[in-house]
């Protein structure tokens, strides 16, 4: 095993991805600075076209961030106060926050213990006369079970909005996520598989009507200057961010494949450890995060830190347990799988610039930890 290294092996390394394109990024900055057009300009239009082509959808609408993407997709789809939206309790807060922001109510369904995504077998029992939409999350880059979700939605005439904020480039049955439901929402936060140097978001859809409504809402409800037909938002993407994303977009498939290869190495090297539970590799997963299930997670995390290895906990508080959701939805509910995962999941370093030497150090450190525990 390698000796402890002073240089930390980070969970994510967005800086390295950007540094490799320093020359192209600098040229883009200079081009935009001299253009005098800094918000919703040509770079945004081209990014929308290029992402739509990449994902195989008709429409792409750039927005200020992924949370706004969820909010505007829900509102444009007609979901409003008092409506219920079925979703997962095991996600980042923005998933539920977006539902609450438009006055709707998140109705949680526990997650599948093998995928960490919505357990589709429990969805129908959560449907009421107030249900208007299903909001599945493609958690950690693994697509949710969209075929049964879409089947249920069609039967009950619900809309489906994909929270694909962690899953840019992921595939479900050969199709890119985002274009499988009525709308798909993406985040371009720096640590995402495709990210910029700040916030950024997007909604994609095959509905021209939905796209036009979102474009209206993102710009203060105005399709032409000073004439407002709706109460909207200020959710416009800056040209700098759009230019960065256009430069990085052609690399995302290669980066995702590198993530998959590293994830497979983790799986092969660690699956024999009886104290660890690991997701089996699933086609289409692009591993925004690679997490293992371990008891007494904090002990392993501290041990890794001792050897200068970063790790992360996603998400230690299931959404239904948060103070911000107190009194919302159906009181007294428990979601055993989500609650267990919140206590046991530990994310390991994984990004396209993680070297094999670094990954082997992570693996051998984990193996050594459990050997010491057994001794």
Image (cartoon, grey):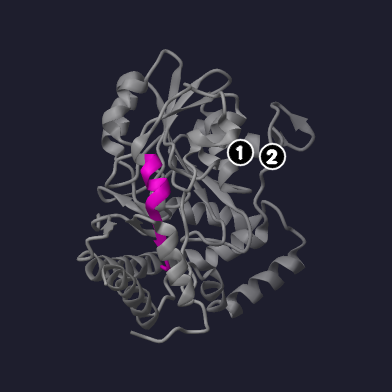
Tell me: 64 left or right of 206. right
Which residue is depicted at the point 37% across and 19% down?
Answer: 127
Q: Position of residue 234 (x, y in %)?
A: 71, 41
Vertical side of 153 occupied by 194: above or below: below
Q: Quadrant of the N terminus?
A: bottom left
Residue marked by disc 1? 215
Which residue is depicted at the point 64% across and 35% down?
Answer: 216
Residue farthest to the bottom?
3
Residue farthest to the right?
226
Residue marked by disc 2? 219
Specify the quadrant of the image occupied by residue 132. top left
Residue farthest to the front?
375
Tell me: 73 left or right of 368. right
Q: Position of residue 246 (x, y in %)?
A: 54, 63
Q: Which residues are magenta?
A: 338-350
Which residue is depicted at the point 26% across and 33% down?
Answer: 148
Tell me: 87 left or right of 227. left
Q: Residues within 10 Å of mark 1 (few under 14, many from 20)?
A: many
Q: Position of residue 153 (x, y in %)?
A: 34, 26
Q: Is residue 339 magenta?
A: yes
Q: Quadrant of the C terminus?
A: bottom left
């Amino acid at each position: 095993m390698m000796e402890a290294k002073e240089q930390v092996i980070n969970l994510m390394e967005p800086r390295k991805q950007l540094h490799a394109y320093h020359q192209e990024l600098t040229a883009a900055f200079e081009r935009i600075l001299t253009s005098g057009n800094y918000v919703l300009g040509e770079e945004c239009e081209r990014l929308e076209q290029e992402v739509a082509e990449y994902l195989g959808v008709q429409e792409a609408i750039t927005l200020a961030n992924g949370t706004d993407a969820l909010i505007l997709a829900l509102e444009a789809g007609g979901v409003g106060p008092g409506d219920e939206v079925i979703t997962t309790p095991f996600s980042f807060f923005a998933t539920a926050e977006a539902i609450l922001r438009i006055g709707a109510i998140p109705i949680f369904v526990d997650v599948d213990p093998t995928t960490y995504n919505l357990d589709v077998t429990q969805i129908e029992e959560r449907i009421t006369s107030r249900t208007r939409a299903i909001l599945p999350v493609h958690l950690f880059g693994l697509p949710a079970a969209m075929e049964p979700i879409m089947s249920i939605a069609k039967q009950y005439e619900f809309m489906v909005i994909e929270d694909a904020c962690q899953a840019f480039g992921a595939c479900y049955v050969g199709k890119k996520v985002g274009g499988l439901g009525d709308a798909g929402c993406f985040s371009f936060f720096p640590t995402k598989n495709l990210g910029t140097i700040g916030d950024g978001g997007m909604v994609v859809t095959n509905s021209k009507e939905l796209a036009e409504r979102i474009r209206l809402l993102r710009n203060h409800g105005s399709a032409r200057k000073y004439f407002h037909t709706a109460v909207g938002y200020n959710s416009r993407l800056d040209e700098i961010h759009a230019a960065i994303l256009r430069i990085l977009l052609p690399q995302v498939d290669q980066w995702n494949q590198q993530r998959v290869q590293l994830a497979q190495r983790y799986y092969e090297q660690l699956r024999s450890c009886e104290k660890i539970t690991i997701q089996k590799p699933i086609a289409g997963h692009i591993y925004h995060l690679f997490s293992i299930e371990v008891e007494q997670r904090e002990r392993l995390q501290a041990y890794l830190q001792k050897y200068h290895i970063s790790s992360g906990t996603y998400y230690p508080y299931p959404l239904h347990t948060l103070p911000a959701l107190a009194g919302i939805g159906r009181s007294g509910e428990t979601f055993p799988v989500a609650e267990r995962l919140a206590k046991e999941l530990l994310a390991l370093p994984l990004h396209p610039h993680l070297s094999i030497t670094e990954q082997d150090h992570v693996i051998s450190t984990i193996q050594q930890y459990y050997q010491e525990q057994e001794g």
